[in-house]
Image (cartoon, rainbow, N blue to C red):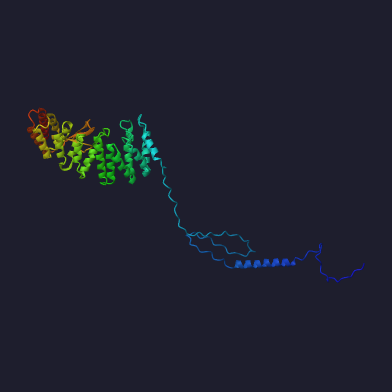
Amino acid sequence: MSSTPTQAGSQRPTNAPGGRRPSIVLPAVIIGLLVVGGAIAYKMFESSPPPAAPVATVAPVQPHPAVRPLVPREEVAETPVAPVAVVPEVAVTPPPAPAASRVPDVDSRQLMVSLASLDLKGPITADDAHKWKESLQQLVRQGASSVPAIREYLAQNLDVSYAGVSGAEQLGYSSLRGGLLDALGQIGGPESTAAMLQTMQTTVFPIDIATLAATLEQQSPGQYQGDILTAVRAQLALGAQDQLANANVGPLFQLLSSAAANGTDVSADLAQYSGKWPYYAAIELTTLPNGAGVPSLIQIAQNSAGTGQAAAVQALAQMAPQNSQALTALVDMAQQGQLSDFVLSQIAPYLSGRENQLGPATNPSGTTSQGLHIASGNQDFTAVDLLNALTPAQVAQRVSVIDQLLQAIPASDTQSQQALIQQKSTLTGRQTK
């Protein structure tokens, strides 16, 4: 079969399957143009100066070494350069000081139980004392949060006495109440003050009032004098009705004397309780300013008998060398036979320098003292002999007082006559030294 011939190159190749692959020249040209364009752009980027870095205020630092200029890529292989970090200037804040270590709070009532449960069946050891004092100090360190537990215990009028217990001196207090009252004073603040004032009004322990009065006066001088005096009077009234279990009320009489020194008239208070506590009343009546207690002493001496009269007459004899009213009263009562021979004999040492004193006192060197106890009313006081501290003028004055009494005393009162003559001889011998 014949075919029609064609001219070479006059017919395009077909894309039939199995035929020749299409030309790739055009895509290659396009890729080449993109590469050339990128290279040109890169050259331009290298030849232009780098953009200025952001300016930041920095602390002076050691300058970095100079950076080498860039060289053409075809000469030296490009080495990446690590970027330089720019550190802004900032204020350096020192690290905070470590917080002071703080002992965790312990339940105050648990501490109270620990304090009250100190074993007193045997000697108190050093370890026992350390634990007890540490519990007390923990109450103090916890401050106002401890006050309610302390106040609750004190309000129950409970106490633990350490008197006579071996090793108790290590505690620093004679009783638990003493330690708690001191803790309140150390804590301070309004909560503590309120607790102290409340305790003064409810306690049945006279020493509590004296301790709290001293603390309050030290913290706020003069501010609580009225509260203190009210508490003293209320507790003396209870004691007069035997509701204080025979407690020693000497500290209350001392507080009355302190109130008198601050201008309060307490002579009626002292006279009121002279029947129950004759020596306490008589001693403090002698301390009232300007002899204000003499009229009450005279009245007690004239209207009392036994211990009450003896206490008042001794107080008058103690004051007679310096107080004419006291001397006149003694002479009159002796002449009228109102004083027994025994009572008169007892006053002789007081005419030559003896004094009854309540509480601690500072006396001149060379004096001697003797502690005395009166079972009735549980009264404790000190008789101090001031003979060696008398001046010649004072000795002469006392000899004159004895002479007046010797003339007033009936001759039949031989006991008192002898006692007075002996004291006169002692004074005269002192006068010649």
- Name the residue at 22% across, 33% down: 379
Q: In which quarter of the image is the C terminus?
A: top left
Specify whether 235 is left or right of 329: right
In which quarter of the view is residue 334 placed? top left
Residue 19, percent across and down?
81, 63
Residue 270, percent across and down?
20, 38
Q: How many labels does the image show?
A: 0
Residue 28, percent across and down?
72, 66
- Name the residue at 38% across, 36% down: 113
Residue 20, percent across and down?
80, 64
In which quarter of the view is residue 201 placed? top left
Relative to 121, is 270 above or below? below
In which quarter of the view is residue 17 placed? bottom right
Residue 352 visible from this viewpoint: no
Nearest the viewer among 417 and 171 is 417
Residue 239 visible from this viewpoint: yes
